[in-house]
């Protein structure tokens, strides 16, 4: 009875995980710690074996052996979590295989608070830091000569030697316009955010360039605010000019939802009279829009995963430099259905 009880309570070992997965102990360790260049199938097989055996790594012991805490800090300026939460989910997906914890700190666009959290995370001996925010525009590096690697996610560092992972917003705008062209629309207006805003400018330029490549010009380009109210107001301006638009590409889903309301109130059918595409693929907006909104998804979770993977590589001595742009994807819904 005593032997049976000891077998029940004894935790599984890494060797047992390796044996069940059919790999070496070293390979199992790399798979669970997010290290090495392993095939996805191998990592998955090891993870499944660990779950089946109830394997729990001794983080404290591993920290003592490797001189690490197996924690990563994430500093954000996105107080409402619109962008930072999906990014963190993606980062945790990548870090979870190695059982690395993420400590989230909200700097709230306050440089003093940001530096306080940076010092706090460093005092906790984090192995690396991910810096993110609610805008894609490049920012100054969070600090110089830090003792741990840093990766910028969604936002980018103004230092080209830093590692940054951003959405390819121009790619997203091109996908939106090409989709509208593919369904036969030719008189395409663009309603977007403030002209001084980096994302608004990038998306507007890509929209105009894509149309120009087809020998077309935007029916109208209107800059304003990232709000539903601006979407309604801009639609009123658009309709008052008498422009015969058959599609509107919006710089955000919030704007697009306002446009949809104004078009409906004006008696314009969507997509029969005017097809509509948004940007962000924000579920609370695209699903509440009537009809449901076709939108561009920036793959925020994918950006978080990529940033975390690059950070893990840097922690293990293989640091990447420069800017990496993650492609967007179009998510079609009823607002462009034909």
Image: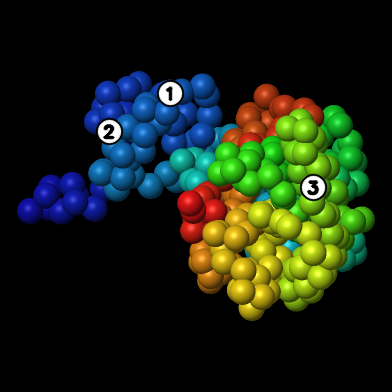
Q: Position of residue 10 (x, y in %)?
A: 26, 48
The disc label shown at residue 303, or none:
none
Mark 2 or 3, closer to the camera? 3
Q: Position of residue 221 (x, y in %)?
A: 83, 54
Q: Is residue 90 visible?
A: no
The residue depicted at 81 percent of the width and 70 percent of the height is 240
Q: Taking 4 as reference, is 91 left or right?
A: right
Instruction: Indicate whether 215 appears above or below 275.
Output: above
The residue depicted at 46 percent of the width and 41 percent of the height is 97
The residue depicted at 59 percent of the width and 43 percent of the height is 184
Q: Position of residue 228 (x, y in %)?
A: 71, 72
The front one of 281 and 123 is 281
Tell me which numbered mark, 2 or 1, is placed earlier along the sequence. Answer: 2
The front one of 8 and 49 is 49
Badge 2 is on which residue?
16
Tell me which numbered mark, 2 or 3, is placed earlier along the sequence. Answer: 2
Q: Is residue 252 visible?
A: yes
Q: Position of residue 70 (x, y in %)?
A: 58, 45
Spatial separation of the CA atoms under disc 1 and disc 3: 46 Å
Tell me which numbered mark, 1 or 3, is placed earlier along the sequence. Answer: 1
Query: On the image, which quarter does residue 76 sit in?
Result: bottom right
> Badge 1 local density, few (<14 within 10 Å), some, or many (20+)?
few
Instruction: Indicate whether 223 appears above or below 92.
Output: below
The disc label shown at residue 39, or none:
1
Query: On the image, which quarter does residue 276 sit in?
Result: bottom right
Mark 1 or 3, closer to the camera? 3
Badge 3 is on which residue?
218
Q: Taking 314 as reference, is 38 left or right?
A: left
Spatial separation of the CA atoms under disc 2 and disc 1: 20 Å
**Of helix, strand and loop, which one carries label 3?**
loop
């Amino acid at each position: 009875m005593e032997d049976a009880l000891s077998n029940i309570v004894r935790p599984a070992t890494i060797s047992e995980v390796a044996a069940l997965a059919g790999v070496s102990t070293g390979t199992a360790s790399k798979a669970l710690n997010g290290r090495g260049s392993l095939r996805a199938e191998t990592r998955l097989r090891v993870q499944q074996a660990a779950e089946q055996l109830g394997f729990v790594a001794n983080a404290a012991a591993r920290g003592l052996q490797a001189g690490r805490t197996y924690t990563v800090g994430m500093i954000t300026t996105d107080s409402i979590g619109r962008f930072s939460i999906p990014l963190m989910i993606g980062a945790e997906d990548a870090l979870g295989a190695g059982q690395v914890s993420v400590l989230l700190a909200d700097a709230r666009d306050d440089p003093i608070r940001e530096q306080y959290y940076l010092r706090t995370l460093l005092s906790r001996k984090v192995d690396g830091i991910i810096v993110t925010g609610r805008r894609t525009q490049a920012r100054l590096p969070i600090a110089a000569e830090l003792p741990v690697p840093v990766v910028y996610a969604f936002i980018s560092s103004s230092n080209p030697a830093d590692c940054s992972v951003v959405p390819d917003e121009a790619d997203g705008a091109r996908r939106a316009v090409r989709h509208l062209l593919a369904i036969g629309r030719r008189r395409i207006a663009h309603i977007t955010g403030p002209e001084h805003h980096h994302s608004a400018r990038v998306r507007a330029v890509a929209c105009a360039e894509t149309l120009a490549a087809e020998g077309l010009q935007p029916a109208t380009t209107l800059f304003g605010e990232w709000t539903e109210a601006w979407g309604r107001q801009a639609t009123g301006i658009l309709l008052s000019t008498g422009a015969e638009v058959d599609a509107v590409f919006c710089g955000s889903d919030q704007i697009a939802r306002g446009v949809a309301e104004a078009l409906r109130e004006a008696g314009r059918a969507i997509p029969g009279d005017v097809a509509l595409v948004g940007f962000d693929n924000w579920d609370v907006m695209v699903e509440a829009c009537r009809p449901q909104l076709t939108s561009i998804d920036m793959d925020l979770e994918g950006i978080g995963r990529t940033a975390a993977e690059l950070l893990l590589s840097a922690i293990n001595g293989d640091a990447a430099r420069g800017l990496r742009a993650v492609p967007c994807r179009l998510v079609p819904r009823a607002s462009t259905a034909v």
